[in-house]
Image (tube, helix red, strand yellow):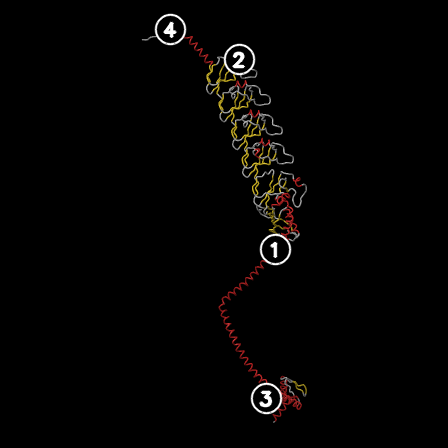
Amino acid sequence: MNTTKCPMPGRGKAAMPLLMLALAVFLLLYGSAALVGGRELAVLERRWFGDALPKGRVVALAHEVGVQARVLEPGLHFLVPFIYKATPCPVLSIRDDQVGLVEAIDGLAVPPGPIFARVVEGHGLFQNGEAFLLSGGEKGPQLQVLPPGNYRINPFLFRVTLAPETVVAPGHVGVVHAEDGEPISEGRLLGRSVEGHDNFQNAEAFLARGGQKGPQLEVLLPGTYRLNTRLFRVQLAPATVVAPKQVGLVTARDGAPLPEGEYVARSIAPELHCDFQAPSAFLAHGGQRGPQLEFLRPGTYYVNPLMFEVTLDDVAVVQRGEVAVIVSNIGTDPREAAGAGGEAHGVERYVVASGCRGIQRDVVGPGTYYLNKLAFTPHVISTTNLTIDWADGRASDSGSLFSPLAVVSKDGFELTVEVKVIIRVLPEQAPHMVARIGTVENLIEHVIHPLIDSSFRNQASSSEAMKFMQDRHEEQRKAEEHVRAELQRYHVECVSVLICQIVLPERLMQTLTDKVVATQQMSMYDAQQDAEGRRREMARTRAQADLQPSLVKAEIDVSIAEQQKRQAVTLAQGRGEATRLEQEGVAAGILARGRAEGEKVRAIGLATAENYRLQSAALGPAPLSVIEVMRQVATGQVKITPDVLVQGGAEGAGAGGNVLAGFIASLMARQGFEILGPNELTGPEAPTQQDHAKSKASHSTESG
């Protein structure tokens, strides 16, 4: 069963007005309410019923028509309908590594000169725009910055630019350049340091306390800074790092001018300016512009590079066998200390005592020294023997090398001489050497090299080539004496001058070589002859050694024979003495007998001679001679008859007599007889008077 209900006509008409009223109330309430979320803000605009904006203004105050300076915070807000309009906007969020740079779109005009608007209080970091305007906030870039966080800032009044925080990394410094402030004082390069700006993070304090526009004295150390980068421009520069065995030489670019005639600024205690890391203190204590006497030792320094230029230099190292002569660029003028004048008693004028400007008399021994070479210039001088070579090849570590000397001898030959000069600088003479010539290199180049070249040219030109080579020792001695005398003027000791080699021309060398070869050959022949003699001696010695047993036996035999000889001599001497005595007796007997026989013969001879004389006187020499011959023939003393005789007839007989007579005459001649005259007969056996007497006696005997 369907039941249809029909509305009551009276009740429906009464509900419609109520519904319409409720809808109107809802719309009124909806239009007057503004709900702002937790991360939002509402920009409020007044459309009707208010004062007009002053000329030049773009943001209205509460009683003015326009976009309001104030904003609605989170929550439910009821507004007069149709007069206000709320427009939601997100809040401004700044991260931890950012800052907000604020620029006011509305406000008072910035006075002429400043770039940034002055700081006003009570606006809650620009979140209360109406308070900003009522406090006299100025239009333009603001000095204050917004740190990280969330901000409800009216975007129609403030334009916020997010910028990264200023981060100075370790090992760097931040060099700051201010875009606003007072002008830099005349004569200065950098803006003066002011207090209370919290490393340039408080821009208001910087400007309020007289911060100057331009590059700043102070720097930012490593760290993170919330700077107004529109006011402060930061450039990162590496920190000054002085490595071990180095020094940092500092030159100040700002400060008081140097006094006339000074090269290095006066010293300021490092603790006063913290090793040039507090430039304001440096200037406050009268720091001077230019090279500084103080220097930086090894370490890391946060120095403003716009204020101080740091040049790294090696430490002064003096090795063993060396000294350092210090030339001071600071101190008392030597003319005031020693007076004008040249060299006195071999001491150079500018070799001065400590505290005076010039070459220091006291040298520095071996060691490592942190030295400001802008103020003190060290000249390291070797005090050991230094060798200078004029030869082909490579120089030693402690010497110099020049080409061999080419000289011409007196007889026109070109010689090449290799020379070695050894010099030494005594420690106490080193300052005077530096004052006279400067450096050892200057000494070698401008003194020793010309001196050696000239000396050997002069010596070679006064001597013949062969004689120059043969008198090498004498030439070396003369050169050494000359060089030693010259180097004494430069306070340098000449240890020795050595002639290493003299190279003669090839044709002259060939002659000399031939002569030497001939001499050597002669020596070789003498040696060979010596060797042969020694070989013979050796052979004889060996033979003697081989025959040594026989020699010993022979020596023993000789000793035995010597004893036997002595025995025989002794026996013979005994026998001889006996024989002598015996023979003396026999001789005495024989002598007596001989004398007797002699007397006998003499007597017989005298008698015979007398006989011959008498016969010759009686018969004549010729007959007597024939008689004597015949006697000798008869006695057989002379053979006159041949064993075989062949003869002819009768004539032969007469002839035979003549022959016989001739034969007898020739025979007498062979026997030495000579017939001189009728009564003379001479010869080896010519009869004397005794012979004649004997002949007569003989004839008498024969006749009887």
The first of marks 3 and 1 along the sequence is: 1
Which numbered mark, 2 or 3, is in the foreground of this view? Answer: 2
Quadrant placement of the N terminus: top left
Q: What number of labels is visible?
A: 4
The first of marks 1 and 4 along the sequence is: 4
The answer to which quarter of the image holds residue 374 is top right
Q: Is residue 77 above or below residue 303?
A: above
Front-lying residue, 624 or 161: 161
The first of marks 2 and 3 along the sequence is: 2
Quadrant placement of the C terminus: bottom right
User: Which residue is disc 4 drawn over?
Assistant: 8
Residue 256: x and y in percent read 62, 32
| Amino acid type for the residue under numbered disc 4 | Met
**Residue at (49% x, 16% y) in the render:** 86
Q: Is residue 626 visible?
A: no
The first of marks 4 and 2 along the sequence is: 4
User: Which residue is disc 1 drawn over?
Assistant: 512
Which numbered mark, 2 or 1, is in the foreground of this view? Answer: 2
| Amino acid type for the residue under numbered disc 3 | Thr
Label 3, secondary structure: give it.
Answer: loop
User: Which residue is disc 2 drawn over?
Assistant: 50
User: Which residue is disc 3 drawn over?
Assistant: 635
